[in-house]
Amino acid sequence: MTSEELLKQYNDWKFRLSVYEMALSIIEIDKLTVAPVAGASYRDERTAFLAGEHFSIMTDEASLNVVKELKESAEDPDIRKEAETYYREIMKIVSIPKEDYVAFQRARDASYDAWVAAREADDYSIYEPHLKSMIEWSRKLYRYRDCNLPLYDQMLDDFEPGMNTAAYDRFFESIKEKLLPFIQKVIEAKPIDESFLYESCDTAKQKAWTKQILLPYLRFDKDWGFQNETEHPFTSWTCENDCRTTTRYFENNVTSSVFSTIHETGHAWYEHNISPKYDGTILSTGVSSGMHESQSRFCENYLGRSLPFWQANYRSLQETFPDVFENISLEQFYRAINASKRSLIRTEADELTYPIHILIRYEIEKGLFSGSISTEHLDETWNEIYQKYLGVHADRASDGILQDVHWSDASFGYFPTYALGSAFAAQFFHAMKQQMDVDAALRENRYIDCIYWLKDHIHQYGARYSADEIMVMATGEPFNPNYYLDYLIEKYSRLYSISL
Ligand code: ZN
């Protein structure tokens, strides 16, 4: 085959793949947002068929040879990297029989449906057999890979290439060692009054404020982005100019939707800013889960929970809800949105205790796959570990084991990337502040300048470079968790007047 023919075959194959990926993505967004629950099993059956077709294209032998050839011989380094990345992903699934792959997709959809039902009934026993089935399915599917690494290490590597149990153990050890004693000091310090954040704020007014003030401030543009509502906020996309985010509104927690909006649009900005030269290819996506989460948490916490962000936005919030905020100063508001407390819900947790929520999930996942923890009574195990690290106990399963969607779709190994991403973000924040006046940008309604920095240093590359390479290019040094630990301890010492 001439190199022209080779490239033509390759491009046709990529295009066909991207067609199925777009369809599957839209179907999933629909399922998670507006699709009526009663139609779930009909849809799930057909979605599994489509996923099977995608699998067949992905693992087709002739195309695999083309990818292999290009990964070794393509002159263009972008194409070589692309082909390498496809090859790596194909190798993960190529030995799985198609029937198993399709049956797993069906089981996974059923598991998600059971999780929704279990949450509604507040009953872990509805979900338990499905969780068990997701673990068994994972064991089975990974066995086909014929890889010598321990199973959980393979899972960790899938979400964060290059990471494994040893590296995460070191990371979480430093969190335990430095943050747990510091959190104890914060608990003993004078609490910050945040009670006014839970007063009633009409959700229709919250939605109007988000639409008229917050989304324009964040420059989330409806030409390429759309915000919907869901129980569990998320971001998805089909290409850089079609990014979907969701949020949820609570009458008695006005800032919940604010921060989920900032978080999810942070994910959307990452996808939107990837260079169009990678369109329709495997490089046109964030490089890893940790890197993705670093971008959303950067926007949510490092920018969104800062004083300058609210110097630009607090007055309009006060004017929208005068009954609640009229007599609350900007400083009081800023302290309240950063108040730290031992809480049950990960997505509502403050920045300081957040990594502890992740540490707990990491320990449970490790236990589930080493066999030291069972799905039986996992609701109780969950509470024991929460008690140990955070001193809290969930009376309702929906505030405990049932709060997160991730295990219902077999995303084991995903959670640790949340803490890692928060730590990546601290290092990016440090670098950004050396190069631009972040506070002035936020105060002066130039949030977009921060996004441009992220685009130049991170977003534009998509998956062209590894997370490690991007870290060095953007900050001048390899990942160092001390930026994160120092940032948290410095910020919370100031907030709680703790002398170090
Ligand atoms: Zn996120």
Image (cartoon, rainbow, N blue to C red):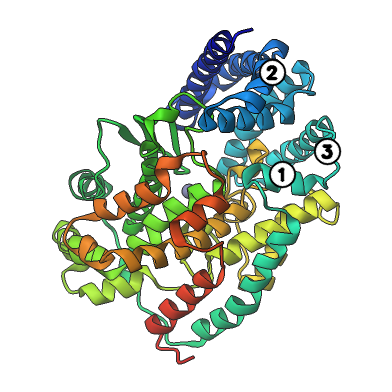
Tell me residue 400's x, y (percent): 61, 56
Residue wearing tag 3: 147
The crowd level at tag 2 (other Cα within 10 Å; few <14, some 14-19, many 20+) is: many
Q: Earlier in the sequence, mark 1 or mark 3?
A: 3
Q: Earlier in the sequence, mark 1 or mark 2?
A: 2
In the structure shown, which secondary structural element does the residue marked by tag 1 occupy? helix
Residue at point 66% right, 18% down?
55
Residue at point 64% right, 14% down?
57
Q: How many marks?
A: 3
In the rendered structure, the answer to whether residue 129 lies left or right of residue 182 reads: right
Residue at point 40% right, 29% down?
277
Q: Which mark is residue 155?
A: 1
Inspect the image, locate mark 1, and give the three-letter code of the amino acid beneath it: Met
> Which quarter of the image is occupied by the N terminus?
top right
Disc 2 beta carbon < 8 A from ligand 1?
A: no
Quadrant of res 64? top right
Labels 1, 3: front one? 3
Inspect the image, locate mark 2, and give the three-letter code of the amino acid beneath it: Leu
Tell me residue 33's x, y (percent): 44, 31
Residue wearing tag 2: 64
The crowd level at tag 1 (other Cα within 10 Å; few <14, some 14-19, many 20+) is: many
Q: Considering only vertical position in the picture, is 415 above or below 80? A: below
Q: Nearer the viewer, residue 99 or 19?
A: 19
Tell me residue 343's x, y (percent): 53, 67
Q: CA distance from mark 1 to mark 3?
A: 12 Å
